[in-house]
Amino acid sequence: MVLGSGLGDLANEVEALCTIDYADIPDFPVSTAPGHEGRFVFTNIGGKNVVIMQGRVHLYEGYSAKQVAAPVRLMKKMGAKKLLLTNAAGGINSSFNVGDLMVITDHISSFVESPLVGENDDELGPRFPDMSQVYSPDLISKVAKNAENGNINLKYGVYLQFRGPNFETPAEIRMARALGADAVGMSTAIEAQAAKHCGFEVCAISVISNLASGISKTPITSKEVNETANRIAPIFKNLILKSVGEF
Ligand code: HPA
């Protein structure tokens, strides 16, 4: 599980069987983003062994797509089979409200470097991996069932990853909308790409932390992003803990 901006507290509420700071792992990329703790937390949720990344690394921190994807590959090597990615995202779809949860049904990663460029490790996955179904319908249906039981009006949509660190211009958001994006952010698609390549079943959920540039009536700030994520965190936490127990 990868916890995004403002969502890291979830890892403080589970019983940590062991924690490892990224900084203590040789050559491991270290999170510098606010609200990203930077450690692995090993726990058990509903009888499932779970490793949580409390904080991730991003392209905008100066890391390459390969470095951003390295923790996903490491979790694969640890034996993980299913990956839940979370993030805070700007809402583009006009039916979305701040505070909504959006299950990612597909993504657009064409604006960022691919983690799969360079020599392929055939033991990890194929040179030319299929991306026609990155997000697992089975995992999505488990999340959908738990959302329904919890009276959460779950949204669905396409996530577009930009490099950041600046938020977008209104023109960029109009472009993203024209391309079919429902939400934008600065993470997740690269990790999902690497995860699909190495055989993970992938699920991803965005907290719509703000309306995207030009749609929002006020300038976008990371304070707003983190505040919304913190506010929604209890609802999100329940949904995730229930769902991951069934993954
Ligand atoms: N744009 C990009 N990334 C984001 C946004 C946004 O509006 N909100 C949260 N992460």
Image (cartoon, rainbow, N blue to C red):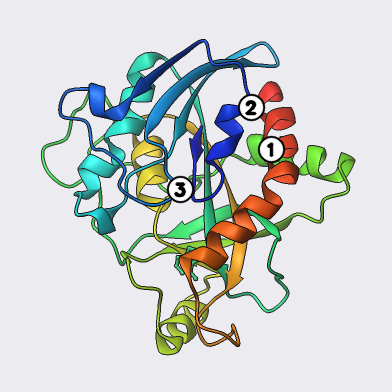
Residue type at numbered disc 3: Gly
- Mark count: 3
Mark 1 or 2, closer to the camera: 2
Mark nearer the N terminus (1 vs 3) = 3
Q: How far apart are marks 1 and 3 (CA)?
A: 16 Å
Say which quarter of the image contains residue 207: bottom right
Q: Give the residue at mark 1.
A: 237
Q: Give the residue at mark 2.
A: 13
Residue 124 at x, y percent in the picture? 27, 26
Residue type at numbered disc 1: Lys
Mark nearer the N terminus (1 vs 2) = 2
Q: What element carries label 3?
A: loop
**At 27% across and 59% down in the image, what residue appears?**
60
Residue 209 at x, y percent in the picture? 60, 63
**Viewer-nearest residue: 99 or 131:** 99
Mark 2 beta carbon near ligand 1 (under 8 Å) = no
Q: Quadrant of the C terminus?
A: top right
Q: Give the residue at mark 3.
A: 35
Say if residue 25 shows up in the picture. Answer: yes
Q: What element carries label 1?
A: helix
Q: Is residue 39 above or below residue 9?
A: above
Circle 1/circle 2 CB separation < 8 Å: yes
Density class for disc 3 (Cα within 10 Å; few <14, some 14-19, many ≥20) is: some
Say if residue 130 shows up in the picture. Answer: no
Density class for disc 2 (Cα within 10 Å; few <14, some 14-19, many ≥20) is: few
